[in-house]
Amino acid sequence: MKNKDKLMYVSAAVLAAGTVAGVKTTNVKAAEVKQVNANSKLDLNNAAQEEQAIVQDKTAQGQIKQDTATVQKTQDQLKQDQAAKTQAESAKTEAQNTLPVKETAVQTAQTKLDNAKQELTQTEAQNKDLHAQYDSTTENAVHTAQEAEKKLDQKVNDLTDQVQNAQNKQTDLLGQRTNVEGEIKTNTETLNNVNEQLNKAQADQAQAQKHFDNVQKDYVPIQNEYNAKKSATEKAAQDLKQNETDLAQSQKQLSDLQTKNDDLAKTVNSTQDQLDNANKEINDVKTDLNQSQAKLNDVQKQSNDVNGKLSQAIVKRDQAKSALDSQSTNSQTITLPKGFKETFLAYIKAMYADEKQADELEKQLAELSRTGKKMNEYQRNLKDEKRVVDVQNLTSDQLLELNKFGINLINQFRAQLGKKPVLLTQGSLKFATDVARIGSSHNNLESLSFHDMKALYEGAKLNGLSIVAVGENAGPHDYYGTEPKKHELGPDTMDTLKQGIYDDIVTMIFGNVDESEWQHADLFAGTGAGGDVLDYVNSDGEHIHKEYPVYFGIGVVANPPIPNKYNPNIMKRNMRFVYDRVIDRNYDMYDDPNTFVPEDQRVDYNKFNVKDVIPIDNLDNSQARQVYAAAQNEVNNLQSQKNSLDSQIESLTEHITQSQNKVNNFTKTINDLSTKLANAKTEQGSVQGQLSQTAKHVDELKAAQPALVQARDNTVNALADYEQTHATVLNDYNNAKSQLEQANNKLQSATKAKDEAEKVLSQNKAKLAKINQELDAVKSQLADLTAQLSDAKASQASAKANLEKAQADYDNYVNTHKDLIAQISDSDKEVTAKKEALAKAQSAYDKASQEYEEAKNEVAKLDNKVKDLDQSIATSQDSIKKLNNRITSNTQIIESNKQVYAQASKLAARKAFDAQINKALDKVVYAAKPVNQHTAQAATVKPAVSTKNTKHALPQTGANDKLSLFAALAGLSLSSIGLGSLVSDKKRKRN
């Protein structure tokens, strides 16, 4: 049941309750319950649809976000590939242009190489013929004799050296023999002396041994007791010394342990403090980490929301751009960057009021202007590029088209500032055309870089305009010839002129060439002093606000081509676009006839036509442009939000990473400190145990010290008494023992000396025998070498005689063949020169061939690169197309689901309203008292109230007043929540 039907139904039920008290309403409630059940099913179905829509939206938004990022990435790659392709094609063309030159170089080098080879072959043949005429017999004989003499000279020298070496060796061996013989004599004398000493030592040792044996007979009876007392004395002294050493070590150990215990106590306290601080700091960092993570989650949620909105906004922007593009074959737009409007308006206002503030704003405006120039670039139009025009004789249609084009751009700028559009009229078109025509007649061929004020004044006067009412922006352009050979100017096209107008307006809006002045932009905007808005408070306190009509026209001033001053071979054309403005302050006169407008600001409507407004709808596309501008602004705003959120996410993520690193570091520090503290406490307990044991040991050592001292003294005294009692025997024994040891040592030394002397004597005798043997061999060798040297000297004399004869024969041949020998010498030099020339020619050919092959390989490489880039570009374009289609499809899903959400919202509202109705109905039904069946039946047949004049009346009955009053109140209550909509009275609807 629809809401309206249900309202009517419930209203009828309430009215019935007010009319007939006590009528049973079982059927009414049953119908109501039935209706509620139906609504419940509808709610369930809609809930399922809404849940499905949410899932679809989430999936679609995620896919849009992913696809948008992929499109952006692919577009970036596409731009890179296109730039790379342009660069590769340029490099390929450049490389191809070098091929003919390199190929010619190879051919030239090949020719030079062939000539060099031919010349060398001819020269070598001539050289061979000359060498064949030469008789080398005498020359060869000289060489042979020289070689024989050289060999014999070398042999004589070698043999002479060998004889000298043998003689030197013989002399050396004789000297060695003399030395060795002297050493043998000395060794023999030494051995005789050693034998004498050995005999004496043997006798002394025998006598000492005999004396020792006699004394030992008296020593043996007391030896054991004496040794025992001596050992006891040594042991007592050793025990005392050991106890003193142990005591000193234990006392040092006790001191070291005490120091270590103190250090460990400090370590425990210090480590505990560090651990407490680390725990406090990690808790602080964890708190900050949790807060940062929560903030990051919130910011990421905002970012996801903004990304979804941005994806949708980009799709809407692109759709708006497509719609805008479809309305014009030459769609050009000017979009202001975010913040430019506010900064520009504030700057223009401050420029006339606050110079310091204007300086600050100028810096911001310059930065925004640089961004604006990058955002706005002319889009070339293939159709207009084919439309060749004569710029000095533009047709009226062409001039009108340029005016519509330019004024449309000006109005785009004004619309984004919140200003009304300027108008193009027959009067403003004629005014700008006249100014351009007069300027062209002045024939300023060299430069059109400045305003032609004379042309502006004359044009204004000609069109009934005061000079105060007009203003002008001008954009100069210089075009230079680039055609090969002739360097002539190419043809002018409509696209060239439109680009000039577009570049002028963009440059003027965004601070001129160097982003330093915006007076030109202000003339377009009409926002500053002398603008098209009058806004002030008069002397009576009234706020006066007037907006004057503004007319614009665009003229083209063009000179014929002239030679460039700096390079007469290149042609040049000077051109200027003039953007002439007229502010119609006569508006005050027909807005308020009593308002006086100074004569110098008036417009003569008899000369300046303001009535015939020329529409520019074919280029304006104002609604589509507004939609596109709004969509672009939305994208800019969301992109700015996204950038801000991304920056926050990056900052928070970095902060969280740093905080997590701090937590990890603190955790490691805490673990390390905990381990260090536990180890220190454990070690402290161990040290304290060692302290107790060591202190006890020190006490024990101190207690044992007196007894050990007494024991040492007792053993020393006992030994001394025993030695005194047996002093004679002990002294005799010790002396005899000492004498025997000395005798044994001397005997041992003498025996060793004898062995050494015998060994040295034997070695020298062997050395002498070897020297004698070598002397015999040297004598034999010397005799043989002397005989060989004598023979060699005889052969040497014979070889010298042979050489002198051969040299004489050769000199005679040379004297009789001087010309032939000179020719051969010159021919040899020429052969050498030709070989060097051939080597150079071969090197030049190899280099040229290598460079040519490298160039061909580079061309092939660049050609393959271009093909690969073409394939990559095609793939990227296809991918972008598919992704944009999917983005559009997902956007349509999201838009479609909005209807589901709207339906769900309506059903929720209706459900709440149904609940109110049912509650009110329950009160009405269960408040009624039973009446007799006859009354009830009569009520169902006969109307309870009159049908006259009841359009706005509530139902009236004759039943009990209490119930009637209740029904009336219930009816009023229901009417306040929507029953009024059931009647058709206009006044009631307004209520």
Image (cartoon, rainbow, N blue to C red):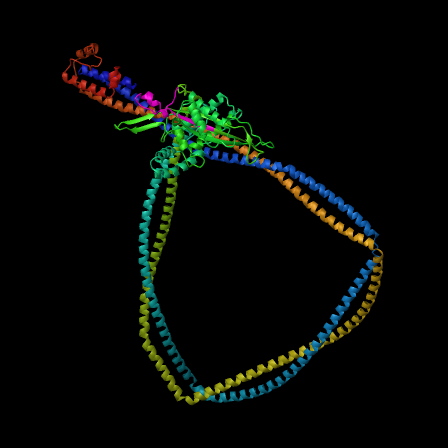
Let me know if residue 693 appears in the view: yes
Identified at 26% across, 20% down, the residue is 33
Q: Position of residue 530 (x, y in %)?
A: 36, 29
Q: 654 or 826, which is in the foreground? A: 826
Quarter of image, res 235:
bottom left
Of the 4 image quadrants, the one containing the C terminus is top left
Residue 561 location, x and y as percent?
55, 29
983, above or below 52, in the image = above
Where, by quadrant of the figure, is residue 231 drawn?
bottom left
Q: Which residue: 77% across, 52% down? A: 828
Residue extending furthest left?
Answer: 961
Residues drawn in magenta: 577-605
401, above or below 137, in the image: above
Answer above or below: position of 873 versus 226.
above
855, 313: nearer the viewer: 855
Q: Is residue 300 left or right of residue 924?
A: right
- Which quadrant holds the N terminus? top left
Question: Is 65 colored magenta in this rendering?
Answer: no
Q: Residue 600: within the magenta?
A: yes
Q: Is residue 281 left or right of residue 494?
A: left
Residue 589, percent across and down?
Answer: 33, 21
Q: Is residue 373 above or below residue 796?
A: above
Residue 27 seen in the figure: no
